[in-house]
Image (tube, rainbow, N blue to C red):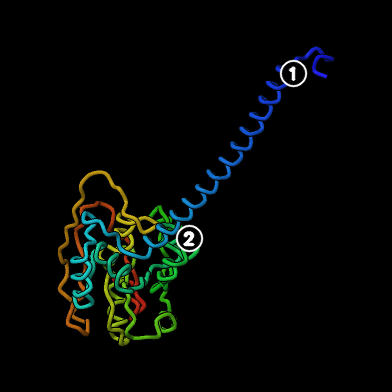
Amino acid sequence: SGYRYGVTNDTLCLFLLIKMSSTTAMMMQTTTKAVVVSSVNKSAKRAQSVRTKALATPYRYPEQGFTDEVVEEVIAAFPDKGIASNLEGMILFAADGYDVLDVRSDAEIEFVGNFPTARKNKEVGVRFHCIPLINAVRKYDSEVGAKVYVQSKNESFKEKIEQTFPDKEAKIIITCSDSRDRAIQALELLDEWGYVNIVGLKGGYNMWNRQWDQNMRRRNLPGNFKEEFSHGAEGMGVHGTGASFQNQDAFQYADWKDSTKWMEWTSGTIPADE
């Protein structure tokens, strides 16, 4: 029949071979795509698994300071040491079961930023608790020419603390904007209310946010930065273990300090300017 249409048998065979090769190639291409997609999915799942584990455990790189020796030293030092640096705070959070209590107002958190939240990462976010010591609303002040925080005492602070931390031996890192005022107040209050494993976070959220991102990874800031701490006030000596909670001073950044004068929770008044 090949001769009938002017096509030789050899030509027909060649045509069939080419067609079969094309079909085979298409099948191979489809199979390859399936393998690639499957491989990508597996890689994505592995990456997600590694990321999830990394968020819940300390980084193990020596340059981060998270060697076994350092981790053990930090865990052994607290809560007696009283105030933790960002590095120590991360180790306590990741390796020793400490939760973080943020006593900033909701208005601050909305304006400035938040620690990791459960909405973004449930495993990590559920261990950050926001309970304002002082409630505040940002309003424009014509005399100042800028928005300021209009403050009021959070009367339910103690109730919320006891609901969130019913166990007086709960491990808690306490922080505010810069941990120089409200975090100190909260440390004194929780100590008075019988909590024994409480630690202040040096520099508060403002400095934590410079060090760690929302995924609890170290930020890659340009330049070499050094933390310089000194005490601008005498130790308060209120910790049951003998440690003292002290005001922090002098980080090597110009704007880490909170310029707002915050209300004293016990008196419900804002201290007068000195």
Name the residue beneath numbered marker 1: 9
Look at label 2 and name its amino acid: Lys
Percent across and percent down for residue 102 are 37, 69
Look at label 1 and name its amino acid: Asn
Q: Which of the pair 268/251 is nearer the observer?
A: 251
How would you rate the neighbour count of disc 2 (Cα within 10 Å): few for under 14, some for 14-19, many for 20 or more?
few
Q: Which element is circle 2 on? A: loop
Percent across and percent down for residue 191 are 28, 83
Residue drawn at x 33%, y 72% is: 270
Q: Which of the pair 236/84 is nearer the observer?
A: 84
How would you rate the neighbour count of disc 1 (Cα within 10 Å): few for under 14, some for 14-19, many for 20 or more?
few
Q: Which element is circle 1 on? A: helix
Q: Locate the C terminus by quadrant.
A: bottom left
Mark 2 or mark 1: whose residue is earlier in sequence: 1
Percent across and percent down for residue 257 are 28, 59
How many numbered marks does the figure carry? Answer: 2
For residue 120, the mark is 2
Horizontal placement of 191 versus 1: left or right? left
